[in-house]
Amino acid sequence: MSSSAVLEAPAEFRREGALFVISAPSGAGKTTLCKEIIDIFPNLRHSVSYTTRTPRPGEVHGRDYFFVGQDEFSRMVAAGEFAEWAEVHGNFYGTSLKILQEHRAAGIDLILDIDCQGARTLKGRFDGGVYIFILPPTMEELRRRLTGRSSDTAEVIERRIENASSEISQARWYDYIIVNDQFPVAVEQLKSVLIAEQCRTSRVLQGLSSRFKI
Ligand code: ADP
Ligand code: 5GP
């Protein structure tokens, strides 16, 4: 969604927007999971990242990513326009600081599908983020999913599998780990994390301060 769209949270959500940061080795299913839950929560949007990667079939500029050239990406880095950015699997990816700040200020929760390097950067830079790691049930299943997705060349798939082990070793510092084996179960678990975090005292108190003396 465009960063210029009008942002206004429903009255019951008048608090700072939460950041739900999701990482996983490529192919674990986080894009599919995020798409599944995004419509369930009226106050939740997907943070659209910038990338130098070429679009996959079916991907839409501004919906899946903002696809930009290397020069534009480098300009944005130099101008401090990213909340975080990283090189992942040979391409550059970054989260717009403006989009993130606008949503937080408007009380809209954001779900960010970003790699472990970017997640680390955000953890050091912003308070109150919720860090969720998605695992595949096995490495064999991860390979099957990457191959079955039919969107990457064999070389790209090999590079993603080679990177998976070091990414998985990062899971231990995340707040939650969801094993995406049976898809409906993983969806329920992700939903549960979001619901629980939206009920976290520190968040709810912000929204209630105008109504009650707590
Ligand atoms: P990621 O965004 O983590 O790289 P995707 O969401 O693109 O991964 O999923 C990779 C592939 O695995 C897709 O073809 C998707 O349909 C499939 N997939 C996702 N979750 C499951 C699951 N629980 N069981 C089987 N296949 C899955
Ligand atoms: P893909 O090319 O499969 O869409 O994404 C590759 C990897 O880049 C995934 O791990 C994804 O989470 C990560 N990624 C996507 N957007 C961003 C971003 O804005 N910042 C960072 N650090 N990683 C991102």
Image: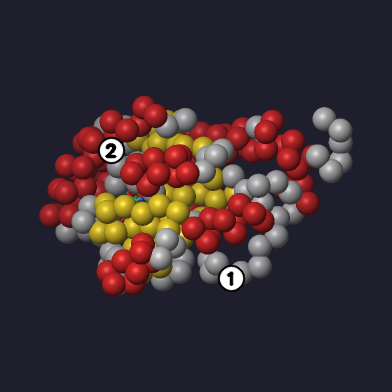
Q: Report x, y in % for residue 110.
A: 55, 51
Q: Is residue 8 above or below residue 119?
A: below
Residue 6 falls in which quadrant of the image?
Answer: bottom right
Tell me which residue sits at (44%, 62%) in the image. 81
Q: Which residue is mark 2?
A: 167
Tell me which residue sits at (16%, 49%) in the image. 159
Tell me if 197 is positioned left or right of 64 in this view.
right
Q: Is mark 2 within 8 Å of ligand 2?
A: yes
Q: Report x, y in % for residue 88.
A: 27, 52
- Mark 2–mark 1 contact, CB under 8 Å? no
Q: Which residue is mark 1?
A: 4
Circle 2 crowding by C-alpha within 10 Å: few under 14, some 14–19, many from 20: many
Q: Quadrant of the C terminus?
A: top right
Circle 1 crowding by C-alpha within 10 Å: few under 14, some 14–19, many from 20: few
Look at the image and tell me whether residue 21 can be seen. no
What colour-coding does the image apply? secondary structure
Which numbered circle lies on residue 43? Answer: none
